[in-house]
Amino acid sequence: MEEIEETLLADFAAMIMGGSTRKTFPLSSTDLPDEIVVDILARLPVKSLIRFRCVSKLWYSLISGSPFFTAHFEHTRLRNKRSTSNNNSEDSHILLIPPPDSRDPCQMLCEKTYVEQARVENPYKTRLRGCGSFTILGPCNGTVALLNFDICRRLVHMHMWNPIIGQFKSIPPLRCYSADKEIEVCLQDILIFGFGYDGSTNDYKIVKFMYKQADSSPSGLVQVYSVRTNRWRNIEASNVNIEPALVVSSPAAHNGFIHWMARKTTAGKDKNWRETIMTFDVGKESFAEMACPRCWDTTTQELILVALGVANDSLCAIVKPLSHKNRGEHKRCEIWVMREHGVGDSWTKQYSVVFDRRISEIVGLTVNGKLMCSGMDEESHEQWLVIYDPKTSGCSLVRKFSRIHLCAFFSFTESLVLLDYR
């Protein structure tokens, strides 16, 4: 790959200058239409494109523009989808973020080989400072949103981050609670955030809303941040179809929607909970409900939906038995895939997975459909990040951590988003 990149760099640089430095390359800059050059560049890795910006002002402007970001990510997404069958993609990565009080850098691994590719800035150490808790939203098109809840000041500090290019964008802090309320009163409301992409306007947005802990009813306004305008807007909750629910999972962004696994009370005297998926249309800025996989007996509720994710360019659900039914030597779960987004009947069970005792908890899904888990080495009893491949039933101990429950892990597809941010 490196030799090909260097050859392309030499050839394209010669074309831009109006000639060729290689006798075997007869084309000049007038022989290739601009759209062909753009199409070739859009197929190259991010790190190569960062270097190629030095070729000329024209290339710098081209590669640093939002339209090229979109074209490049679409090529990368389709290439990942095609290479899933042979596990041959090198455009997806796993980022390991140490605990908030650690001074260690983040580790970026190749999802294909688990080899460390780079050590990158630890955002806990350099960006997210102050008292409070931390949350990571995403990934979405190769970026994540970092949230620092500063309860003392009733603020949420945020950054948008593209780890592959090391670029951050500061987001205006959001006042999450009234300053005249006691902290104990504030904590009675549950803050929910989501991060997604609107392809119709090429805009990234963060949505924030609250639920009352007592009855799971919406509380206050829905607030939406837009990267294009760099400001927050208030929306009346009654205007966006938000309904009472208990959000019980991290959000998953896919196809212009943000998804949360939620539980709602059923009508009638019994008021039983039922599983559902709550969605937010990033473009229309409205909420709706989506059907869950039909994978359990509604009377016994033996199986529960524990996480949503995106793998192989599809919305996925991880389903497992209730904890008291899942004890013993083996643990199991199911992976369901929504074949057609928004169509409840398109949920299909793709894998039934049985783990051995080394696996303690499922962390999430990788871009290519593997399970990220926390686990323990049976001989040393050390804690590890474990990658389980449901296709082969292979289990790989990837990295050792002393406090794995405080670490953050996510898998993402590389992109150029935020390259144009200053």
Image (cartoon, grey):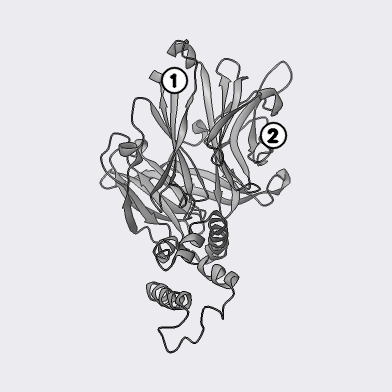
**Image quadrant in which the N terminus is located:** bottom left
Circle 2 packing at 10 Å, graded few (<14), some (14-19), many (20+), is some
Query: Based on the displayed image, in which of its 4 quarters is residue 376 positioned?
Result: top left
Q: Name the amino acid, label 2.
A: Ala
Residue ID at (49%, 65%): 58
Residue named by callout 1:
154
Residue named by callout 2:
288
Identity of the residue furthest to the bottom in this view = 23
Q: Is residue 319 visible?
A: no
Residue ID at (51%, 62%): 62
Q: Name the amino acid, label 1.
A: Arg
Give residue 392's position: percent from left, percent from top.
48, 60
Query: Based on the displayed image, in which of its 4 quarters is residue 242 positioned?
Result: top right
Q: Is 191 left, or right, of 263 in this rendering?
A: left
Against 301, residue 84 (above or below) is below
Give residue 122's position: percent from left, percent from top.
32, 43
Depth check, front residue: 67 or 291:
67
